Image (spheres, rainbow, N blue to C red):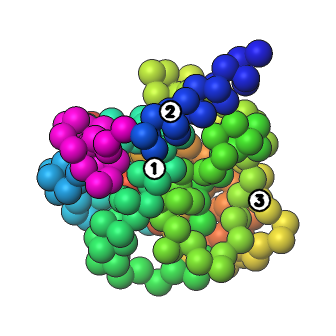
Amino acid sequence: MNGYKKSFKFLIKSILDFILPNKCLLCSNFSDNLVCENCLHAVDFKLELVDLESPYFEAVYSLTEYKNHIKTILKHIKFNGYKSLSEVLSAKIMAVSNLLSLDINVVTAIPIHKSRLKKRGFNQVEVLFAPLLTNTKPCLKRTKNTPPLFNLAKEQREKILCEAFEVNPETEIKDKNILLLDDICTSGSTLNEAARILKNHGANKLYALTLCYVKSHAK
């Protein structure tokens, strides 16, 4: 029944979006896009090194702090089905991520569980970083449908995420330098668990790039 309610909700939203003038989701001013140019320019994108305690990564980078506009945008993408917002951000993400100068053989995204993929319809990380993932197969599969982790302590996150990933047997990662992509770096538990699995299967150097980070991990 809940599935029908959500489908009906999205249908009504789509009809209203078609009939009514477009407004920016952030400031409510009229806009040709879901987020107006002023609000988009207000997001401070720059390449930053994240101070993440990890035995697996050579370095972890992020593009902006998880606050204000970007926080609202990500919530709309992940919980309200606004896939097009990921596409709007993609150009800005690429402009900054191109500043990375790393010896990378493979680029892959943190996967979401198949049940969540079915419900949402897309993996937001893959859409956000689509230009970096052209013609690449995902190296990892999500084996556990983990609950939302944002409000949990680091120890709880690590326990829930244990064995949450497995390597895709169709990919070659042995001795490869891999760039791992995700949307948010909070405690780093998700990145670390994914990296642990990759290292255990022979990956060489690992790097991570996320759209945003929680400030406690800024360097």
Q: Amino acid at mark 2?
A: Lys
**Of the image marks 2 and 3, the number of the one nearer the N terminus:** 2
In this rendered view, identify the residue nearer to me: 203 or 142: 142
> Is residue 33 a member of the stretch shown in magenta?
yes
Task: Give the extent of the magenta segment.
Answer: 20-35
In this rendered view, identify the residue nearer to me: 112 or 188: 112
The vertical placement of 32 against 92, above or below, is above
Q: Which residue is mark 1?
A: 183
Q: Which residue is mark 2?
A: 13
Q: Give the distance between the C-alpha atoms of the residues marked 1 and 3, in whole angstroms.
A: 20 Å
| Neighbour tally class for label 1: few under 14, some 14-19, many 20 plus, Cα within 10 Å | many
**Looking at the magenta stretch, what is its main secondary structure?**
loop
Q: Residue at (20%, 56%) from the top-left corner?
A: 37
| Neighbour tally class for label 2: few under 14, some 14-19, many 20 plus, Cα within 10 Å | few
Q: Secondary structure at mark 3?
A: strand
Q: Position of residue 117 (x, y in %)?
A: 69, 44
Q: Secondary structure at mark 1?
A: strand
Q: Which residue is mark 3?
A: 167
Q: Position of residue 177 (x, y in %)?
A: 57, 76
In this rendered view, identify the residue nearer to me: 199 or 74: 74
